[in-house]
Amino acid sequence: MSFYDWLLALHVLAAGVLVAALVLYAVVIASGWTLALPSEVSRMFRLSRVGDVAMGVGSIGTLVLGIWLAIDADAYQVWDGWVIAAIVLWALAMETGRRAGTGYNAARDRARALVGEGRDAPDSELSALVRSSTALAFFAANVVLIVALLVVMIYKPGA
């Protein structure tokens, strides 16, 4: 196996980890819509820690290894249109993901605060945060951008 093959395998693995993080977040978000008690919401958000690590590893891994692949391969250049498009899509996906995370982290923090105060009754503010249409829209945009990124990486338009 050549060095290029190892880079490609690790790049694809990082992309898989990134997609796994998205699936995990989707499960956490969907589960949150059915929960009412702060303790349940807080417990559900513990699972998102795994997604946070996976997202970090997957996002940094795809970017670094992807650029390294473009530099290492004679057939591709970092300034190829599809590589630049992939980098732009990656940056947009990271920003929409950050904004979605900000919204859902507010729900997590509210749930933890309520549990810490010993208040484990349904809370309208917590429900509104968990069901935030803004955070959900940013998450949906994040998913669309990552799928578009995967399409660009698979088909390499213009290469």
Image (cartoon, grey):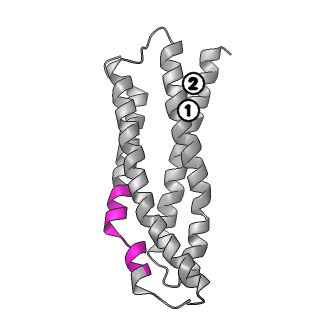
Rendered view: 84 above or below 79: below
Q: Does the magenta stretch include residue 17?
A: no
Rendered view: 133 above or below 95: below
In this rendering, position of residue 72 left or right of residue 139: right
The one of 111 and 45 positioned closer to us in this rendering = 111
Query: At 54% from the left edge and 48% from the top edge, which residue is drawn?
Result: 55
| Quarter containing the C terminus | top left
Query: At 38% from the left edge and 47% from the top edge, which residue is drawn?
Result: 95
Q: Are the residues tagged 2 and 1 within 8 Å (C-beta)?
A: yes
Q: Is mark 1 on a helix, strand or loop?
A: helix
The amino acid on which the numbered mark 2 sits, given as a three-letter code, is Leu
Q: Mark 1 points at which residue?
A: 12
Between the C-alphas of marks 2 and 1, the distance is 6 Å
**Which residues fall within the magenta stretch?**
126-139
Q: How far across and down, in percent of the image, does residue 53 sit? A: 60, 50
Label 1 CA crowd tier, 10 Å (few <14, some 14–19, many 20+) = some
In this rendering, position of residue 97 left or right of residue 47: left
The one of 83 and 123 positioned closer to us in this rendering = 123
Q: How far across and down, in percent of the image, does residue 21 sit? A: 54, 51
Residue 156 shows in the view: no
Q: Main secondary structure of the magenta part?
A: helix
| Quarter containing the N terminus | top right
The image's mark for residue 8 is 2
